[in-house]
Amino acid sequence: MNGAIGRLGYGVRLAASCWALAVLPAPAAAQDLAITGGTVHTVSGEVLEGATVLIRDGRIVEVARDVDLPAGISRVDATDRVVTPGLFDVTTSLGLVEVGAVSSTVDGQMQGDPVRAAFDVVDGLNPRSVLIPVSRAGGLTTALAAPSGGLIAGQAAVIDLAGTSVDEMVVRAGAAMIANFSAVAAGGARGAVSLRLREVLDDARFWRENRVEFDAGRSRDVSASRLDLEALGPVLIGEMPLIVSVHRASDIEAVLRIAADYGLDLVIAGGSEAWMVADRIADAGVPVIVKPLTNNPGGFDRLGARFDNAALLHAAGVDVIIGSFTSHNARYLTLEAGNAVRFGLPWEMALRAATLAPAKALGLAAEYGSLEAGKVGNVVVWTGDPFELSSRAETVVIRGRVTSLDNRQRGLLRRYRELDDERPAFKETGP
């Protein structure tokens, strides 16, 4: 997984083997860096007091209390600070949206047919989005840029929140297929959603087994385009996870049945009533992405929403992932995690739910999510407990480089903090 990634912007992975080639590019001008003296939460192992995280060429090479540091190496003093892996949010459209109400700035949703499996977000990514620096300043280093809408929304990409080009940002294109188990998505009753989803999966399987006959016009009709059926190939063979947005307990059970019937690598997103069927989810080995601050029913499929959903799922043995479910305020991921702790989720499990658990669900645990030798050097130094409102990200390291925490909001604060009384309050004065 150490090769360079191409843009892979052809709309669809050509085959499952091509999907496996979408991996992390080499970091541009990575630093040799030592983060010293902090309380290091490795996530995968013990908490180390007064420890050092040593990074070379964008990769962590050592995490320990006693590390021999090369002369002249750049250092970040983390004394009296908390050090964690960079946060990983899998519920955003970062790089794909600027102003939600202005359609010309929304590149994460394809209109038309509810089945859009071939839609790949990579060519719509904007590395200069103003939302990225704001999220980075909140300790977010990695995100899933996901499409939305329809029954099958399309393919999401994992990105690191640094770099000035798409090639520099993208960690994995085609990282997950996004779907919505909603009556609205299929234009009818819930049974119609299940029927339509099964029909598309059946046709994708048929197409894989009869593509020669299909291309020659000697096969039966199918319910989706050739590109969409081709894009579902990695999903059918378990090489690409299917993230399904679903909330009602009975709907979750229906999705679990579909995943079992087709051998899918399923991830549940939302899951407001997941606690009601936690044992079934745990038995299926399916992770659940939750928004811990949800306790009000946003619809009739969420009447059972409650604050301790994450804690109840964890107690049942479910691998819990915490998401912000927003792009403009993805920095609130720490607030979501803190509230999960408030309602019973162990602190270390909340940190794992925002770092290693999402990386594992997307098949990136060998590269991301914990502070271990060999992993990508995404590290955050916090002024205190990252889940406390009074704490902030003091230093954010992405791929071994200390990144800027400046952003549009801080720039506007500086500009208008002290106004010249002789000048109109909103006169443009330059950056």
Image (tube, grey):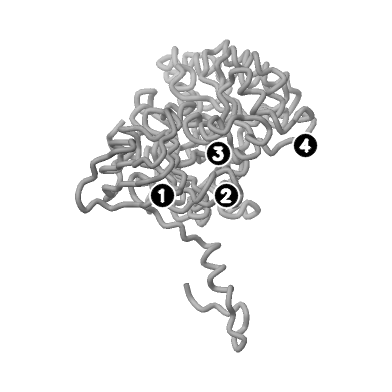
The numbered mark, 2 or 4, whose residue comes first in the sequence reads 2
Tell me the distance, in whole angstroms, between the alpha carbons under discs 1 and 2. Answer: 42 Å
Residue where numbered disc 1 is placed? 79
- Residue at the spot 26% in from the left edge and 50% down from the top edge: 29
Q: Indicate the amino acid at tag 4.
A: Asn
**Residue drawn at (46%, 37%), measured in percent from left and top?**
157
Q: Which of marks 1 and 3 is nearer the N terminus?
A: 1
Q: Of circles 2 and 4, which is in front?
A: 4
Asked if 429 appears above or below 402 in the picture, the reply is below
The picture places residue 124, in percent across and down from the top left corner, at 47, 46
Q: Which amino acid does label 1 sit on?
A: Thr
The numbered mark, 3 or 4, whose residue comes first in the sequence reads: 3
Front-most of residues 316 and 119: 316
Task: Give the residue at mark 4.
Answer: 296
As measured in the structure, the alpha-carbon distance from the residue carrying label 3 to the one carrying label 4 is: 25 Å
Q: Earlier in the sequence, mark 3 or mark 2?
A: 2
> Which residue, given by chain and number where applicable, does mark 3 sit on?
147
Q: Name the residue under label 2.
A: 106
Query: Looking at the picture, how far across and down is residue 166, in whole percent?
Result: 39, 47
Q: Can residue 192 be seen in this view?
A: no
Q: Distance between the residues labelled 2 and 4?
A: 28 Å
Q: Residues within 10 Å of mark 1 (few under 14, many from 20)?
A: some
Which of the two discs, 1 and 2, labels the residue nearer the N terminus? 1
Specify whether 146 is left or right of 274.
left
Residue 263 in view (yes/no): yes
- Front: mark 4 or 1: 1
The reply, left or right, for residue 124 in relation to residue 427 is: left
* Mark pair 4, 1: CA separation: 41 Å
In the picture, the disc for residue 320 is: none
